[in-house]
Image (tube, rainbow, N blue to C red):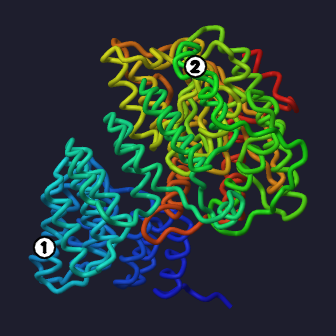
């Protein structure tokens, strides 16, 4: 017997489409309800608006609101909140602000979700006054605020370079919570930094026990502004004492020798050799020494060694340990990286890049076989592809840029395979920076490798600025390795292309194309009208059965000041949808309520992207070892 669908049936279908981020079908189903004379409910309208919000269809969301008025249907708070959320970008924030104002005029009481959404729209546009105004209205209406709302408002102040507003919001949040949230602290620090209020940023955390995120931001700030003593102090404050290096590593804590090396390396890169020697001498006098420190000390110029005397040139000599026990890390954060550092420092041959990388490989393989824990360091076939691409492409000259250092495995291998190149590598996690600087120093490559602290979205513009000032940085890059969340790759590529940091013939290698949803990037380098010759190479890691792709590209047509418009065609909508889902996943890995994205979720988006690209005739090469990358 045929059963006609009713309002409840249609609502269920529309909600299912919304959850699958299919915004077209809800509009079709709503039209069908009209043809079948099935009366939509408020829940129907809410589900349709939520679907448009999920699809980032702000123009259609505004059109739908106008359609509701023609239907004489009154949208409720949920409908309008979804409409505000759909208008969360730089092009449509004024509409979000208008909808929020209309809501109040119509006597609708906004809730915390509505206010947070409105602040998010204002944040993206950098409209700090509006964001602070919404926070004030929340207090006036006795709407409970939370860390998400305050963080969004502070980020709006950062975008508008209004450090005073950020500090006011932080002070207000501290009145409600004696222990300030790390995201609030971090936002206030970055807001002060954006307004060039460096001392204010340092005063925010004076006397506080720093969370990793705030420490990372402060270190980035100090590096950018040449505040070397502040930077040195922040690094040294990371160290913990009272136990051996391996005991500290099991607790996820760095030992004094490692942070001293990280600070000394940075001082040497800024030309403060005397201060670096002073730091190392103090560390040695306290028995806080490792073989990376020994190598850094020995790398001083011959004239410095002569002035210090033979005895001073070797403060402490630590013999290599051919067989060192490998300690299985604990589940504490950073334990894996620090246990690996301890093992390599005690086992690898100092000054030998190949030995350092091989020891890292040994640690990774033993760890996987013994405990099923996988290291993120790119090894085996993946690293071979990177080195093959870099080695074949670097003769055009220029430096090497790496976005995403982690512990420095690929950094060391690239520097070794391109002995004439300087390497700039970016890592946002300051503890990973400490590990990487120690391993690079042990490999004897600190004179050519500079490990910077900070996100690429903040460091790349600095590179452009310093290049314009004629500072001693690479004028352009002959090779780039991207190894972060793939949906963010297009933003990095925009900066590199528009600033002229890339040149024709530059090799561009991008990792994790599938699992991090680098759909727009894949289209950018391999789609219709792309400026790159690209090959995608399949790679397999021990912790995954699905595998991933590594993209290897060569820039064939450089942007000029006369032609800033990218010739590549607009990406097909399925790729845009995957990008939106990848961004949603990325946001789940950061923020005040962050959680890790599961392996199944990554595998699902990887398979979806692989399928969509296959339909567009973009497939991975069958070359098993990636030698085809050298022939681009």
Horizontal side of residue 538 vs 448, given as left or right:
right
Instruction: State the image coordinates of residue 632 (x, y, percent, origin top left).
Output: 72, 16
Vertically, is 466 above or below 371? above
SS state under label 2? helix
Q: Which label belongs to residue 136?
A: 1
**Mark 1, secondary structure of its residue:** helix
Give the class, few, some or many, for how many residues have Cα within 10 Å of label 1's Cα (few <14, many ≥20). Answer: few
Quadrant of the image occupied by residue 553: top right
Q: Residue furthest bottom?
A: 1
Specify whether 531 is left or right of 267: right
Residue at (57%, 50%) from the top-left corner? 286
Quadrant for residue 88, please give it: bottom left
Q: In this view of the protein, can residue 459 be seen by the observer? A: yes
* Residue at position x 86%, y 30% in the image: 625
Between the C-alphas of marks 1 and 2, the distance is: 62 Å
- State the image coordinates of residue 161 (x, y, percent, origin top left): 19, 47
The residue to which callout 2 is attached is: 305
Callout in the foreground (1, 2): 2
Is 375 positioned to the left or the right of 421 in the image? right
Cβ–Cβ below 8 Å for labels 1 and 2?
no
């Amino acid at each position: 017997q045929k059963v006609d669908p009713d309002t409840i049936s249609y609502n269920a279908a529309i909600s299912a489409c919304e959850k699958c981020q299919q915004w077209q079908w809800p509009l079709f189903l709503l039209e069908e309800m009209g043809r079948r004379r099935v009366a939509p409910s408020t829940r129907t309208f809410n589900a349709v608006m939520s679907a448009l919000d999920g699809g980032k269809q702000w123009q259609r969301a505004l059109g739908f609101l106008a359609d509701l008025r023609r239907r004489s249907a009154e949208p409720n708070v949920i409908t309008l909140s979804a409409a505000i959320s759909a208008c969360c970008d730089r092009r449509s924030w004024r509409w979000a602000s208008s909808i929020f104002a209309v809501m109040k005029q119509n006597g609708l009481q906004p809730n915390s979700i509505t206010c947070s959404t409105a602040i998010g729209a204002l944040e993206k546009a950098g409209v700090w006054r509006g964001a602070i105004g919404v926070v004030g209205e929340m207090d006036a209406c006795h709407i409970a605020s939370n860390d998400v709302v305050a963080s969004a408002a502070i980020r709006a102040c950062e975008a508008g370079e209004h450090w005073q507003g950020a500090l006011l919001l932080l002070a207000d949040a501290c009145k409600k919570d004696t222990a300030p949230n790390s995201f609030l602290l971090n936002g206030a620090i970055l807001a002060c930094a954006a307004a060039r209020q460096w001392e204010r940023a340092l005063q925010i955390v004076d006397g506080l026990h720093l969370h990793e995120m705030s420490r990372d931001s402060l270190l980035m700030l100090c590096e950018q502004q040449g505040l070397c003593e502040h930077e040195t102090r922040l690094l040294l404050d990371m160290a913990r004492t009272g136990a051996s290096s391996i005991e500290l590593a099991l607790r996820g804590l760095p030992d004094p020798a490692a942070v001293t090396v990280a600070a000394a390396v940075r001082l040497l890169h800024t030309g403060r050799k005397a201060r670096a020697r002073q730091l190392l001498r103090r560390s040695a006098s306290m028995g806080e020494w490792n073989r990376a420190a020994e190598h850094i000390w020995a790398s001083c110029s011959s004239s410095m060694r002569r002035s210090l005397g033979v005895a001073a040139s070797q403060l402490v000599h630590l013999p290599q340990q051919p067989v060192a026990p490998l300690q299985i890390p604990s589940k504490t954060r950073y334990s894996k990286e620090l246990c690996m550092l301890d093992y390599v420092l005690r086992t690898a041959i100092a000054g030998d890049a190949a030995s350092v990388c091989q020891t890292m490989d040994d640690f990774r393989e033993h760890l996987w076989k013994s405990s099923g824990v996988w290291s993120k360091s790119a090894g085996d076939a993946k690293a071979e592809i990177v080195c093959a691409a870099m080695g074949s492409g670097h003769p055009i000259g220029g430096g090497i840029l790496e976005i995403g250092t982690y512990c420095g495995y690929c950094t060391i291998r690239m520097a070794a395979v391109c002995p004439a190149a300087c390497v700039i590598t970016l890592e946002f996690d300051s503890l990973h920076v400490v590990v990487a600087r120690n391993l690079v120093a042990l490999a004897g490559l600190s004179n050519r490798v500079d490990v910077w602290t900070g996100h690429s979205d903040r460091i790349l513009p600095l590179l452009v600025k310093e290049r314009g000032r004629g500072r001693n940085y690479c004028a352009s890059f002959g090779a780039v390795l991207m190894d972060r969340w793939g949906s963010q790759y297009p933003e990095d590529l925009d900066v590199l292309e528009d600033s002229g940091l890339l040149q024709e013939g530059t090799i561009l290698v991008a990792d994790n194309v599938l699992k991090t949803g680098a759909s727009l990037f894949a289209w950018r380098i391999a789609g219709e009208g792309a400026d790159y010759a690209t090959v995608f190479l399949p790679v397999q890691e021990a912790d995954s059965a699905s595998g991933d792709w590594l993209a290897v590209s060569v820039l064939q047509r450089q942007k000029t000041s006369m032609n800033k418009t990218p010739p590549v065609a607009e990406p097909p909508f399925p790729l845009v949808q995957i990008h939106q889902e990848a961004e949603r996943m990325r946001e789940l890995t950061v923020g005040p309520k962050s959680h890790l994205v599961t392996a199944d979720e990554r595998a699902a988006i990887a398979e979806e992207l692989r399928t969509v690209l296959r339909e567009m005739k973009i497939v991975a090469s069958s070359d098993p070892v990636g030698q085809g990358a050298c022939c681009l």
